[in-house]
Image (cartoon, rainbow, N blue to C red):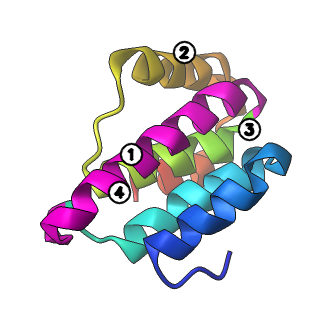
Amino acid sequence: MTAGSWQQLADLAHANALSFNHVHISALVCRLPKLVPSPHGLEVSERGRFSRFLGEVSELVAQRLPTFDPRAVANVLWAVCKLGYSPAPPLLNQFLFEAYVRMEKFNAQVTWVGGR
């Protein structure tokens, strides 16, 4: 994704979300903290739109999470932590479950990615 702002990323996501697979979704989520190092640093008028976009992204993640491989799970968890975003408890529980069922497929590199 070549978006230079979270708004451009949102436009790309809105235009292509139906065709996104786990790699696209992981890349989308991982791009967010690079574009928005701190959501608190956004203008007040932007925060609501960004929050709504995070909600849309959360829905997309929740829908496709069962198709994620261990790397996508780790990458998305890293990005969520980096953003300081707290997913709704059902989504967080779903993530923890997906990580748990894939635990034996995690390797040192994937674990490091999740902890970077």
> Which residue type does callout 1 highlight?
Arg
The residue shown at (53%, 55%) is: 29
Q: Are marks 3 and 2 in contact (CB under 8 Å)?
A: no
Residue 58 position, x and y percent, is 50, 37
Q: Magenta stretch?
A: 40-67
Helix, strand or loop at mark 4:
helix
The residue shown at (45%, 50%) is: 53
> Which residue type does callout 4 highlight?
Phe
Picture layout, residue 69 above or below residue 11: above
Q: Which residue is mark 3?
A: 69
Q: Which residue is mark 4?
A: 50
- Inter-mark Cα distance, 4 to 3: 27 Å
Lower sequence index among marks 3 and 1: 1
- Inter-mark Cα distance, 3 to 1: 26 Å
- Inter-mark Cα distance, 4 to 1: 5 Å
Residue 1 placement, left or right of 44: right
> Which residue type does callout 2 highlight?
Phe
Q: Are marks 4 and 1 in contact (CB under 8 Å)?
A: yes
Front one among 50 and 103 = 50
The number of numbered badges drawn on the structure is 4
Quadrant hosting residue 36: bottom left
Q: Which residue is mark 1?
A: 52
Lower sequence index among marks 4 and 3: 4
